[in-house]
Amino acid sequence: MGFIMRCISMVLAMLITLVLLPPVSSYADSELSELEGIIMDINAKQTSPEKVGKIEDKLIDLYGHVVDPSEISRLIKEFTPGEAITLVVFMKLLEKTDTKVVEMKKSGLGWDKIAEKVNLSLQKVVKTIKLFRKSAC
């Protein structure tokens, strides 16, 4: 009887764990979806050269002490506004101008894979972009 009860309790514990704990991959997928949605929203709203110029100025103002301002200007010209902001945020969180992040994006890597390769939390990237948007766009 004791053996059967232990087996039942182990099975119940495993079922509860599987049901109550969301899969890690779905959490990461939701962060990636949220980031991609933010980027699309920024791109849709920041279409005029004046608006893009304001974003560039704000990025330099907020992050120019960490990310080289000439690199920020280059990214604004080379990528969509949403992608440029995201790349600058990656560099800000890495606390350095890191052109490897740019090369990874150009090679087609997704934001989740880039974050993984540079050991950053995608959640932290999303949070930082949201904070930037409150002050800039």
Image (tube, helix red, strand yellow):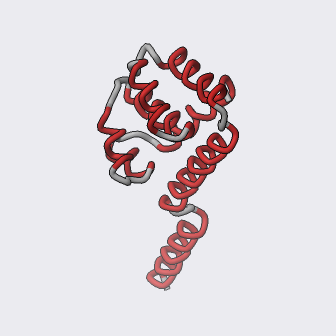
> Which residue is at 33% across, 46% downward?
104
x and y, in percent, of residue 18 in the image: 54, 69
Between 107 and 3, the one lying in front of the other is 107
The mark total stands at 0
Look at the picture and state if 131 lies above or below 105.
above
User: Which residue is depicted at the point 32% across and 42% down?
Assistant: 103
Residue nearer the viewer, 4 or 58 = 58
Horizontal arrangement in the rendering, residue 88 relative to residue 117 (left or right)? right
Horizontal side of 93 relative to 43 (left or right) equals: left
- At which x and y percent is residue 54? 62, 22
Q: Report x, y in % for residue 90.
A: 43, 34
Query: Left or right: 43 with respect to 114?
Result: right
Position of the C terminus, as image quadrant, is top right
Vertical comparison of 111 with 67: above or below = below
Residue at 38 percent of width and 29 percent of height:
94
- Residue 16: x and y, percent? 58, 69
Which of 74 and 129 lies nearest the eye of the viewer? 74
Q: Nearer the viewer, residue 37 or 107?
A: 107
Residue at the image point whose x is 48% and y is 44% from the top: 122
